[in-house]
Structures are given as structure tokens and as C-alpha cells.
Image (spheres, rainbow, N blue to C red):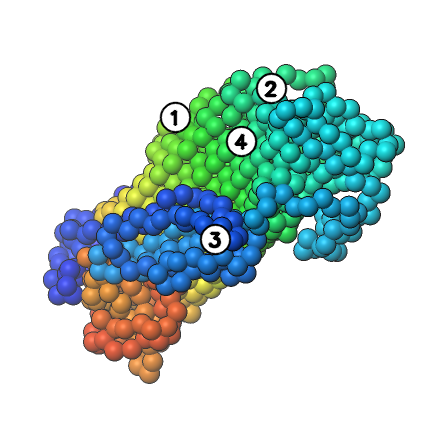
């Protein structure tokens, strides 16, 4: 938010902790001069996903570590694979796991974490023939989505061939028609059956009609349809996709996807019905077409259960990676999505996307294009949900390098207009990591997370908001967002922190921004911006509790914590909140506990003390040694402390294992209050009415 007044701070800067007095009546913020952010260590794996085989010789991905920073390794599923302190991997069992390499921040390098998904397969490409008509539970036996709750009548096995016609076993019903390797099932009696697909063909497909739920077992099948969908499910009842062994479904660059009557054919794997994935094998879907057709689409919902790995590669002329019209629910397993086309999304839903478990990675490279249907320019997203985004567990990593690209985009005006309300987005658990590196193009901006919509009259700074909707609450889990071209986290409605760890950085705009009220009640928050405000609310910005570190290195007129004083809103620092800020506070803020200036040590741990014990420690960015601080019963600061306990927000906050250091005095903070302001020692500090 732009200020009409000059900003004043009483802060001190020293690269090594020395103090320099500044003129409180000079223009801008002298403490911003010479500020430099920490260097990214540039950790990178050689791939985003890798398949290994039990009992075989495997050449695992390598880690690039040009600066030779210290790295720790982890595997999210020790029952699948383990990794030791030197990065050596040991395979344990079939399934998928996320392999992560992490480094902590020091005086030169920022903290970093990079991952890839490792899928471990059994030695055989497919499992032996199975005559069983039942399946083990896939994790939710109280739901009809759990395949174990379904009673099947029979099993038909289709084996595709490169040298002859596909063969069929178990079709005593006479449902299957074979034309070379083009196989069609017409289940006219509505029997509840299992269809098992095996073998290989570069010119075939599997198409099924039916009126009852069904299971399709992919057991070592490699099937390409050069003209369209490789698996086309026209049955509108619940369909279980059981993944065994290694499987591939593909179209071709010349696929025309000619519509047959009124039948949809929207993707390489298409279904009119709900799709529920399970099993422990690997399915790779390649959308190579130039018709905008997607990898996997259901005209109902999609749910991922059990422990399969689903890889989708959608090319530059193809469509979305993974779309469930009604919703997408990721309960377990691993989803690895790569999309390259302009405007297209990695995971998409016309309603909501919910992540409950599993390990998922989305990579998007497409840019902005004109959408003829909506008559406007549109960009890409790692996840797009027209209603809401929810996360309660698991791991989701998104990287979007396209111009105008977003990590997560949830809550559209069209959905709100049709349904008259948006559901609130929420994150209560799990690990969410987002990186966006694109620029704004044709008024389509790149953002890490965008929740909700806003309408305005006018343009630019003179635009007036006429309506907005879309809320987000973060109450648990770990959220990390890095954006170079726009806001890191933008919420058009209210944004509330009720727990968890949230670390957001932006070099292109605000780190955290919301149109409504921004409230911190609990949890850890880190916001760093070198281009605009660290935390910006168009309503009130209220700190009731939790641990907040806000860093703005841009300078006048941007600040660390910004509320909309131009419209009578205010920054409130209430009892119970622990705050560390750099770059100034919004003019006219109200504080119920004393706000101080503190000199610390750049690039090192500093701490807050209440006279008896440490309240918390915070890791300062490189070249920033002066801070605005506030905390319950705060009496002194410490610089150069040691931290041996757990840390939060990628190594920025600590509340245990704090020791040592040198005590430093605190002085009452008097910046950004205007001439003759009431001071920050109590409510109403600053100058009501604003401006001079």
C-alpha cells in the first residue's frame, strides 16, 4: 500500500552488529541502505521423479550443490526407502517416497529444501495372473471409494500385443469386441466386473460401456492410441483404477481426438465417472497431442488412495495434467504432474481440491495466452480450484516458471456467482512448498498462492474495490512460498493464522497480502519482501499471538507491517504477540505492549528475553542487524545466541534450546508515528487522522 507521508524509523544497521545512529527526520529509511538478502545455495536434484527396482542396480538422482553447503537428507516413507547422512539410498519396499535434501541458513546462504519423488517397483513388470474377485482395503473402509467394500462378479483379462490381435480371457458374457488391439467392452447386463489390462500395443485402446461400478486393473500394460484416448471409460458409475507393476498410456502428436457422436474424449485417460486410483505400481500418462487434450480427466471426481504413483506428462500443445470436474481428493499415493501448455493447469477442478496425504509434485512451464471462451488473457497454475483449496496432510510441491503463473489459484468469481458463496480455503496440516518465477504479462500476474476474487472500478492506484470474496485459514502444517514476480500469498478476503509454520518471500511484490483483515492468533509466520510490504492488509492487521517476523528491505514508502489507514484501518499489536520487524510499521498503529528498537547481529541468531528466560530466538537475514521487536513481558534483547532446539519457518524461529549470547538494551520504538505521535507504549500510538 502506498503511503502519502514520509516514513520515519529509529533503527540501526551494521553488517557485524555495530550500531550507527540515523537521523529520524531524514527522508526514507536509512537502515535500508546496503541491505542484501541471503544467497540461495542453488540446491537441485537432477530430476523431479525417479523409478527404481527392488533387487536391481539403480543409478539414483544426483544433487547439485555448487556452494558445498551442509546438507541433511530425509525420506518421507521409511518403509519404501531410507537415505543416510551421505545421501546413499537403500530400497526397502514397493511404493513411493519423497527424498529431500535440506540446508540451514547461515551468514551467507539462505535455507533451502529440494525434493524428488522416488517410486520403488518390484522386479517384475507385472504381477502374476490374479483370479481373485476381492481387494484389500485402500485406506478408508467406511467409504464406497474403498475398493474392498465392493463385491465383484467376475474378472476379464485383456492382453494387448505388438505382433497380433489382443487376446481375451474370462469373457463368458460375450461383452468384449476386439479389432486388432482396439478393444471395446459393452457390459449390457450391468454386471459388476474387473477388467485387467496387460501387454503392449502402439496402436490400440481400451473402451468400456456399462451401467454398474467396475474395476480396471492396469497390470504391466503399455498402450498407445495414436488417434486419441488410450483408455476411454464411458461408464458413468464409480470406476476403480488399480495400478500394478509398470504401466504407460499415451496418445500421439498427431492425435485428432475426433468426437464420436455425443461421447467426450477429453484426455489420454478419460472417464465419465468417478475415478478412484489405488494399488502400489506406476502409471505414466503421456499427453503428446496438439489439440489441448489433457492427461487424466474425470467428468465427476478423482480420488487417489492406497500407494500408486501416477505420472502425467502434458506437452506444449496438450491440456491440463489431472482434472476432476467435481473435485480432486488426494488421500495417499504419489502424483507427479508436468504441464507445458499456456493457460493449462497441473491439477484442476471446477469445485475443490483437497490434499489429505501422499507425496505430490507439480511442475508447470506454460505461459499466458488469450482465452477465447472467457474473452480474456489467462495464465497457468500448479493447482486450480474454482471453489476452495484444502490441505490436512501429505506433501505437495509446486514449481511454476511460466509468466503469469500461479502456484495455487482457488476461488473464482464465476463459481461464486453461480453458487452464491465460496467455501473457505484452509491448511491444517501437511507440507506445502511453492516456487513461482514468472513475470506479469497482459495484466496476468504471477503469484505463489492466490485465494478468492476481487472486482474494482477504475484502474491503478485510483481503482475502488466494489466486491471481494475468498478466505484462507492456516492452522497447521508447514507452508513455504517463494515468488519472484508477484505476491507470495494473496488472499482476497480475510487471512487468519491459527497455527502451523508459514514462510513467504517475494522479490516482486508484497510477501503476504489480503483484501480483508489479516489476523495472527497462533503459529509462526515469516514474511520477507525486497519489493514491497512484507505483510499488507487492506483491512485491519491484527497480531493477537504467535510469532511474526516481517522484513521489508524496499524502503519508503513500503513497510514491514501495513494496514489500510487511508480508510480508517489500523495495525494492532496486542498482548500475547511476539513480533520482530524490519523496515518500519504502519503509521498510527495501536499496541497494548511496548514496542522497542533493538540492535542485533546480522545473519545470526538473536533472541528476546523476559528477565527470567528466553521468549524466542530469530535468525536475522544477512546485513540486517536492527529490528523492531515486541513480546509479552519483554525486557531485553540478546545477540549472537546459540540454538540447539527445533526451529520453525525454515530455520527462522526457535522457542527452545536457546543459550548464550550478549545482552543488548532495548529503546522504545518511535518511528512511523508522525510528529508528536502518542508513542507505541499503549493503545492509540501514532497520529489519528494521518498525514501532515
Q: Which residue is mark 1?
A: 442
Residue 67 placement (x, y as % from top left): 23, 52
Q: Earlier in the sequence, mark 2 or mark 4?
A: 2
In the image shown, does 14 or 89 lie closer to the viewer? 89
**Dot 4, crowdedness within 10 Å: few (<14), some or many (≥20)?**
many
Q: Which residue is mark 4?
A: 286
Where residue 537 appears, as percent x and y from the top left, is 41, 49
The answer for how far apart the CA atoms under marks 2 and 4 are is 13 Å
Mark before the other along the chain sequence, 1 or 3: 3
Residue placed furthest toward the bottom: 612
Q: Give the residue at x 49% y 50%.
A: 56
Is residue 606 visible in the rendered image? The answer is yes
Q: Select label 1 or label 3 by which is in front.
A: 3
Is residue 567 shown left or right of residue 629? right
- Please provide percent x and percent y for residue 334: 55, 47
Distance in Å between CA atoms under marks 1 and 4: 30 Å
Q: Earlier in the sequence, mark 3 or mark 2?
A: 3
Q: In the displayed orientation, state which residue is furthest to the front.
A: 163
Relative height, residue 427 to residue 524 (above, below):
above
* Image depth: mark 1 or mark 2 in front: 2
What residue is shown with label 2? Answer: 227
Q: Position of residue 268 (x, y in %)?
A: 60, 29
Tell me which numbered mark, 4 or 3, is placed earlier along the sequence.
Answer: 3
Q: Which residue is mark 3?
A: 98
Amino acid at each position: 500500500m502506498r503511503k502519502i507521508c514520509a516514513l520515519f524509523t529509529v533503527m540501526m544497521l551494521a553488517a557485524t552488529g555495530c550500531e550507527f545512529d540515523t537521523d529520524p527526520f531524514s527522508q526514507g529509511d536509512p537502515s535500508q541502505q546496503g541491505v542484501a538478502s541471503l544467497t540461495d545455495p542453488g540446491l537441485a536434484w537432477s530430476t523431479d521423479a525417479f523409478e527404481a527396482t527392488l533387487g536391481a542396480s539403480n543409478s539414483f538422482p544426483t544433487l547439485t550443490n555448487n556452494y558445498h553447503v551442509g546438507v541433511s537428507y530425509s525420506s518421507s516413507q521409511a518403509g519404501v526407502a531410507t537415505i543416510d547422512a551421505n545421501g546413499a539410498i537403500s530400497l526397502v519396499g514397493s511404493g513411493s517416497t519423497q527424498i529431500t535434501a535440506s540446508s540451514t541458513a547461515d551468514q551467507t546462504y539462505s535455507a533451502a529444501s529440494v525434493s524428488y519423488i522416488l517410486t520403488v517397483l518390484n522386479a517384475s513388470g507385472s504381477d502374476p495372473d490374479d483370479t481373485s474377485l476381492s481387494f484389500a482395503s485402500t485406506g478408508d473402509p467406511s467409504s464406497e471409494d474403498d475398493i474392498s467394500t465392493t463385491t465383484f462378479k467376475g474378472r476379464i483379462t485383456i492382453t494387448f500385443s505388438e505382433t497380433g490381435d489382443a487376446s481375451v480371457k474370462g469373457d463368458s458374457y460375450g461383452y468384449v469386441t476386439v479389432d486388432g488391439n482396439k478393444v471395446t467392452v459393452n457390459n449390457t447386463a450391468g454386471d459388476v466386473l474387473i477388467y485387467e489390462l496387460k501387454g503392449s500395443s502402439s496402436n490400440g485402446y481400451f473402451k468400456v460401456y456399462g451401467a454398474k461400478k467396475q474395476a480396471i486393473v492396469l497390470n504391466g500394460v503399455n498402450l498407445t492410441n495414436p488417434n486419441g484416448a488410450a483408455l476411454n471409460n464411458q461408464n458413468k458409475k464409480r470406476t476403480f483404477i488399480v495400478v500394478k507393476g509398470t504401466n504407460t498410456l499415451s496418445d500421439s502428436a498427431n492425435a485428432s481426438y475426433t468426437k464420436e457422436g455425443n461421447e467426450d474424449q477429453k484426455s489420454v485417460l478419460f472417464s465419465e465417472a468417478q475415478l478412484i486410483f489405488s494399488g502400489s505400481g506406476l502409471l505414466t500418462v503421456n499427453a503428446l497431442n496438439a489439440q489441448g487434450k489433457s492427461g487424466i480427466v474425470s467428468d465427476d471426481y478423482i480420488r487417489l488412495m492406497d500407494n500408486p504413483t501416477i505420472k502425467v506428462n502434458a506437452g506444449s500443445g496438450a491440456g491440463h495434467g489431472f482434472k476432476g470436474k467435481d473435485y480432486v481428493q488426494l488421500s495417499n499415493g504419489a502424483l507427479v504432474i508436468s504441464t507445458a501448455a499456456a493457460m493449462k493447469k497441473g491439477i484442476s477442478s471446477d469445485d475443490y481440491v483437497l490434499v489429505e496425504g501422499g507425496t505430490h509434485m507439480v511442475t508447470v512451464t506454460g505461459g499466458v495466452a488469450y482465452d477465447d471462451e472467457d474473452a480474456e488473457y489467462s495464465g497457468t497454475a500448479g493447482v486450480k480450484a474454482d471453489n476452495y483449496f484444502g490441505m490436512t496432510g501429505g506433501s505437495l510441491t509446486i514449481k511454476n516458471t511460466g509468466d503469469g503463473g500461479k502456484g495455487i489459484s482457488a476461488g473464482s468469481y464465476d463459481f461464486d456467482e453461480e453458487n452464491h458463496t465460496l467455501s473457505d480455503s484452509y491448511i491444517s496440516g501437511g507440507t506445502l512448498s511453492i516456487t513461482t518465477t514468472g513475470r506479469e504479462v497482459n495484466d496476468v500476474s504471477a503469484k505463489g498462492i492466490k485465494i478468492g476474487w476481487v472486482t474494482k472500478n477504475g484502474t491503478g492506484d485510483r481503482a475502488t474495490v466494489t466486491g471481494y470474496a475468498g478466505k484462507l485459514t492456516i492452522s497447521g502444517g508447514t507452508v513455504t512460498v517463494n515468488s519472484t514476480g508477484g505476491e507470495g500469498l494473496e488472499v482476497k478476503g480475510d487471512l487468519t493464522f491459527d497455527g502451523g509454520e508459514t514462510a513467504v518471500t517475494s522479490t516482486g511484490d508484497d510477501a503476504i497480502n489480503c483484501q480483508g483483515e489479516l489476523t495472527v492468533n497462533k503459529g509462526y509466520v515469516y514474511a520477507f519482501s525486497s519489493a514491497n510490504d512484507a505483510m499488507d492488509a487492506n483491512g485491519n492487521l491484527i497480531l493477537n499471538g504467535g510469532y511474526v517476523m516481517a522484513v521489508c528491505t524496499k524502503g519508503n514508502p513500503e513497510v514491514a507491517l501495513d494496514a489500510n489507514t487511508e480508510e480508517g484501518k489500523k495495525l494492532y499489536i496486542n498482548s500475547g504477540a511476539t513480533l520482530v520487524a524490519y523496515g518500519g510499521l504502519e503509521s498510527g498503529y495501536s499496541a497494548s505492549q511496548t514496542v522497542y528498537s533493538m540492535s542485533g547481529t546480522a545473519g545470526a541468531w538473536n533472541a528476546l528475553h523476559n528477565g527470567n528466560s528466553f521468549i524466542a530466538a530469530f535468525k536475522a537475514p544477512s546485513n540486517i542487524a536492527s529490528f523492531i521487536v515486541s513480546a509479552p513481558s519483554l525486557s531485553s534483547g540478546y545477540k549472537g545466541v546459540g540454538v540447539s532446539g527445533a526451529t520453525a519457518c525454515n530455520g527462522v524461529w526457535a522457542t527452545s534450546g536457546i543459550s548464550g549470547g550478549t545482552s543488548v538494551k532495548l529503546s522504545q520504538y518511535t518511528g512511523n508515528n508522525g510528529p508528536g505521535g502518542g508513542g507505541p507504549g499503549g493503545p492509540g500510538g501514532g497520529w489519528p487522522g494521518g498525514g501532515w
